Amino acid sequence: MNDAVKRICGALNRQGKPCKVAPMLGKERCRLHGGKTPAKQNSGQSNRAFRHGLYSAALTQAEKAVWLTTPTGNVDDEIRMCKIWLARALALDSAISQDPHSMSNKSGLVLSEIRQSSSGDSKSTDVITRRPDTIARINMLLGRIAQLEKTRSDLIDSQAEHGDADGMPLPWVD
């Protein structure tokens, strides 16, 4: 076989010179430089190099479809979203407060624990539910809205002070 056509691994060895061993069949590298590694072993969740993680695990298929096209950087949109969450939390708190001790009021109940016990011949299963801490959620959202309003105010002040080269408003302020 002609040396000019002969394929080589090409990976750098410990001396910093290209490896001259032929690659494995169907591979780009020799067995010593990764040719034996199964395809895609070094990608994905096995080495924690996956593209979607914390957020995408909680997204529905419909939300994943619009995830990358959702605009970011607009403080007003963030404020609106927090106000929607605040309205939901207030509605849930109101529904819970109507009659919190009534057995028929199941508003906001979340499964907390399932206990199974057996004593003698009888077995029992207890389902423990709890209500979310809506007051803490409301306080957190009010704090987030205040923080976003302050950021919005600072951005407007900065825009008024420094302006923009073409006279257009900055993208994060409506």
Image: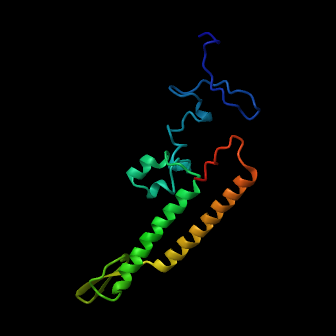
Q: Quadrant location of residue 3?
A: top right
Q: In the current view of this chain or complex, which residue is farthest to the right? A: 15
* Figure label count: 0
- Is 76 on the left or on the right of 131, as rendered? right
Q: In the current view of this chain or complex, which residue is farthest to the left? A: 121
Q: Nearer the viewer, residue 169 or 63?
A: 169
Q: Nearer the viewer, residue 150 or 12?
A: 150
Q: Is residue 149 above or below residue 124?
A: above
- Is 16 on the left or on the right of 121, as rendered? right
Q: Is residue 13 above or below residue 82?
A: above
Residue at (26, 83) in percent of width and height = 104
Q: Nearer the viewer, residue 171 or 44?
A: 171
Residue at (43, 49) in percent of width and height = 64
> Does the image show residue 130?
no
Q: Is residue 122 above or below residue 152?
A: below
Residue at (56, 49) in percent of width and height = 47
Percent across and percent down for residue 26 are 50, 26
Position of the N terminus, as image quadrant, is: top right
> Does the image show residue 168?
yes
Percent across and percent down for residue 111 are 36, 75
Residue at (60, 53) in percent of width and height = 173
Q: Is residue 36 above or below residue 24?
A: below
Q: Quadrant location of residue 148?
A: bottom right
Percent across and percent down for residue 154 are 69, 60
